[in-house]
């Protein structure tokens, strides 16, 4: 065992500080004012810089040409002071202390608050098996969030979690570990200092996080990270707000790719249809027709892998089953005519009986065995298979060729990457690694990221003006740059409904803003009616909204499966569609700031001690609190409303002070939602199909008691023209006082189809006495029917306590001004 105890030597270079200890070598880089990189190796020298994950670097990297949008910056000079017992490096916001003996690294803010401290005595360790450990001090006030896709409650304190991609069909969303994603990053929030920071371990080997589960009386309380190999390459990320940590982490690993707008629609799916003996295409087209008959919006269909089944019943990627899909080209065209995207399932493992197996094998496109002489064969879904090596240019190009030939050439621009966990059981299996062979154990979670990147590239090479829509099951840090993700094959149960929420929230805090879970449960018997309704009512708030199932009782989960309950399903999905402009604006924010769409309450209300462990109620963006009914047979629902804001019931507009728990009566139609003071929520009131229905009326729900701003984002939703300025960003700002001013500032060249703007301005105490659009006084109506038929004007809704304002859309910047002087009717 090797442990760094003593600092022996220091070498200063302008961009880095190199340290030599009695056990390991270290390299410190001040990447910027908020991010510090600490590399540790127990070898003679540091390995070559070769990262598929980072998009922000300050050094030359082997993968520079392979990582789109990578940015190289100049680091802060690593000048240091020798203060006797320790060295000191500084940025404008951070202080890095290198203690000489016992050796340890400590990081504080400019005020001296300790943000991170290595455990002195055993900070960096390599054991006899070659495993690497990094031990950190922890405190009673610390809370830990993130870790990618992890089961259980939001706060992972006192948890031990394994990082490893695995196909966990029917998992327990409270207890199963690991799941599909491998994202070695977490946020530490100290509730006493109110400061958040993060650690990202740039290491793709299997690893373990122990967040205080282990305890020894010989040491202060600690947590640790342990990796099976590689190096300890640690990025410290400063807040002080949780949202700052997420923003800086996504500066490092990439922002969420701006998705197609239609991906926010209801995406139909089930394995059942593609397992029919014949005419699966007709069943899917019939599904879309039935959606329309039932008044249920639908914008696409996830095509399960049964469409690839060969005569022997095995799945063969890139193969269309002619009995189930007689004319794939015509089928894709019919889907398009009905306003639905087709998202076919593909898998990177190719069975040894696959018609294309030999072609890939002879090209050397598979991961090799330990000798490097032949393709590695392992267990897979359906039998023995070899896995495409996406670190090999031959594997990438051959994969893209057949992806284009079999799918993209038909007009398909959406791809579903499934079963891509790369569960290869021989750690000696060799990957090409761009010409420098490396074993799979250090690259396993990278493969699904590269698979997503290849799908994106294949579509863009055939249709350069079209925005790809990629969905991934597995992934590593940075998967958000390429794909939407989902939480795999969940179990059909009330527990899954509940605990999938913190699974998704944890992903959002780990940089993956665009994700969800299979609504109604994937594996198990058909959901009972009440569970089905509650799951849809919850699922409409997830960026990925798809009812997807593989029922174990010979049934198929469909929106109308329980006719007496279909109205609840319809109403929930229509609410989702009303919120599409809000969702799309939030995903634009994710693409620029890294912000989650579904946000734990602690993300927005960090100073409220009562929300630090809340796992099930969440914020949709900054303005809507969602408190879904998650218990069977519930008649009431308790909701804690965070302090720091006032809250309005979504339906009744009843006001509540923050910092209190309220109890609501609930029925089967209830979707408890609350509007935050200062809210600006854009909606589309009549939207039924995102691909085909032009949005001609923008409905803005505004609570103006706080001065806030929100960017409503729009573009054509399907092309890459937004990169050339064809977008519309409308910054809406609220200023209040004696008058309330709502200003609109537009940017971009996108020609919107909007004709009408409607504002519902929630009034706290009195109704307005006058409303002006720029300098024009708008007519006031007492009769809402007259207002409805008028082109512009306003009236006051007594029941909702809202001024309802309507006018024609204006492209130029403008302002709506509301006067709240109380008119003295008696003296008149």
Image: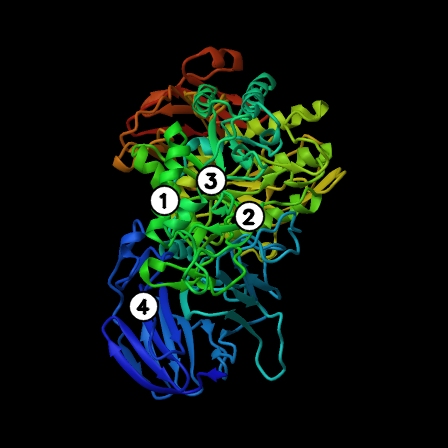
Q: Nearer the viewer, mark 4 or mark 3?
A: 3
State whether residue 734 appears in this view: no
In the drawing, what numbered circle is on residue 398?
1
Query: Looking at this view, is 416 or 616 the one in front?
Result: 416
Q: Position of residue 314 (x, y in %)?
A: 57, 39
> How far is disc 3 from disc 1 in space, using C-alphas?
14 Å
**N-terminal of the two: label 3 or label 1?**
3
Q: Is residue 628 left or right of residue 118?
A: right
Q: Position of residue 227 (x, y in %)?
A: 49, 69
> How far is disc 3 from disc 2 in space, using C-alphas?
38 Å
Question: Which residue is disc 3 drawn over?
Answer: 355
Q: Nearer the viewer, mark 3 or mark 1?
A: 3
> How far is disc 2 from disc 4 in space, using C-alphas?
35 Å
> How far is disc 2 from disc 1 in space, using C-alphas?
34 Å
> For residue 81, which quarter of the picture?
bottom left
Q: Position of residue 335 (x, y in %)?
A: 47, 23
Q: Residues within 10 Å of mark 3 (few under 14, many from 20)?
A: some
């Amino acid at each position: 065992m090797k442990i760094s105890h003593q600092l022996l030597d220091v070498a200063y270079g302008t961009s880095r500080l190199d340290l030599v200890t009695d056990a390991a070598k270290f390299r410190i880089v001040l990447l910027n004012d908020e991010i510090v990189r600490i590399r540790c190796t127990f070898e003679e020298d540091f390995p070559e810089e070769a990262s598929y994950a980072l998009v922000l670097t300050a050094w030359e990297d082997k993968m520079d040409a392979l990582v789109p949008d990578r940015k190289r910056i100049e680091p802060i000079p690593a000048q240091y002071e020798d203060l006797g017992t320790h060295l000191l490096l500084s940025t404008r916001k951070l202080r890095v202390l290198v203690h000489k003996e016992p050796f340890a690294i400590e990081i504080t803010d400019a005020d001296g608050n300790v943000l991170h401290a290595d455990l002195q005595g055993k900070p960096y360790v390599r054991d006899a098996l070659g495993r690497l450990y990094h031990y950190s001090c922890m405190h009673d006030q610390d809370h830990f969030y993130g870790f990618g896709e992890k089961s259980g409650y939001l706060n992972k304190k006192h948890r031990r979690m394994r990082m490893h991609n695995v196909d966990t069909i029917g998992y327990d969303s409270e207890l199963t570990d690991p799941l599909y994603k491998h994202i070695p990053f977490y946020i530490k929030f100290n509730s006493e200092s109110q400061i958040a920071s993060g650690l990202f371990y740039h290491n793709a080997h299997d690893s373990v996080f122990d967040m205080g589960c282990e305890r020894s009386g010989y040491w202060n309380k600690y947590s640790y990270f342990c990796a099976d190999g590689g190096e300890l390459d640690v990025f410290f990320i400063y807040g002080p707000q949780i949202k700052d940590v997420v923003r800086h982490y996504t500066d490092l690993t990439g922002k969420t790719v701006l998705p197609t707008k239609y991906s926010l629609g209801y995406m139909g799916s089930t394995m059942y249809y593609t397992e029919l003996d014949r005419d699966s295409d007709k069943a899917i087209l019939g599904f879309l027709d039935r959606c329309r008959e039932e008044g249920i919006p639908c914008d696409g269909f996830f095509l399960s892998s049964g469409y690839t089944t060969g005569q022997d019943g095995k799945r063969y990627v890139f193969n269309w089953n002619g009995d189930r899909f007689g004319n794939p080209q015509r089928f894709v065209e019919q889907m398009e005519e009905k306003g639905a995207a087709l998202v076919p399932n593909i898998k990177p493992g190719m069975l040894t009986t696959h018609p294309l197996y030999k072609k890939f094998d002879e090209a050397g496109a598979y991961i090799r065995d330990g000798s490097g002489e032949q393709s590695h064969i392992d267990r897979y879904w359906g039998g023995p298979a070899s896995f495409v090596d996406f670190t090999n240019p031959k594997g990438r190009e051959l994969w893209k060729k057949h992806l284009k030939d079999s799918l993209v050439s038909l007009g398909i621009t959406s791809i579903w990457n499934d079963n891509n966990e790369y569960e290869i059981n021989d750690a000696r299996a060799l990957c090409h690694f761009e010409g420098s062979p490396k074993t799979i154990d250090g690259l396993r979670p990278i493969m699904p990221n590269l698979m997503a990147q290849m799908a994106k590239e294949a579509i863009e090479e055939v249709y350069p003006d079209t925005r790809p829509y990629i969905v991934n099951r597995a992934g590593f840090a940075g998967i958000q740059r390429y794909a939407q993700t989902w939480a795999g094959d969940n179990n059909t149960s009330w527990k899954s409904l509940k605990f999938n929420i913190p699974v998704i929230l944890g992903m959002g805090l780990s940089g993956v803003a665009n994700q969800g879970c299979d609504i109604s449960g994937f594996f198990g018997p058909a959901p009972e009616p009440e569970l089905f309704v509650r799951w849809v009512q919850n699922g409409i708030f997830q960026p990925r909204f798809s009812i997807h199932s593989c029922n174990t009782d010979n049934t198929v989960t469909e929106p109308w499966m329980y006719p007496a309950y279909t109205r609840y399903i319809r109403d929930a999905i229509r609410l989702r569609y009303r919120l599409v402009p809000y969702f799309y604006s939030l995903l634009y924010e994710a693409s620029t700031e890294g912000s989650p769409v579904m946000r734990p309450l602690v993300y927005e209300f960090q100073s409220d001690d009562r929300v630090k462990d809340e796992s099930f109620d969440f914020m949709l963006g900054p303005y809507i609190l969602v408190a879904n009914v998650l218990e069977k047979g519930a008649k009431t629902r308790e909701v804690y409303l965070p302090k720091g804001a006032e809250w309005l019931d979504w339906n009744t507009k009843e006001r509540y002070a923050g910092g209190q728990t309220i109890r609501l009566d609930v029925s089967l139609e209830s979707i408890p939602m609350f509007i935050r003071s200062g809210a600006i929520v854009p909606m589309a009131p009549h939207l039924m199909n995102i691909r085909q229905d032009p949005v001609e009326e923008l409905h803005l729900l505004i609570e103006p008691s706080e001065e806030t701003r929100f960017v409503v984002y729009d573009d054509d939703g399907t092309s890459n023209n937004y990169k050339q300025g064809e977008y519309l960003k409308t910054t809406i700002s609220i200023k209040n006082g004696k008058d309330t001013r709502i200003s609109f500032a537009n940017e971009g060249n996108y020609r919107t189809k909007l004709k009408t703007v409607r504002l519902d301005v929630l009034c706290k105490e009195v109704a307005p006495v006058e409303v002006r659009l720029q300098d024009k006084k708008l007519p006031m109506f007492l009769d809402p029917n007259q207002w409805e038929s008028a082109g512009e004007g306003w009236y006051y809704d007594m029941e909702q306590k809202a001024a309802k304002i309507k006018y024609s859309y204006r492209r130029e910047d403008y302002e709506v001004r509301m006067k709240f002087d109380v008119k003295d009717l008696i003296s008149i």
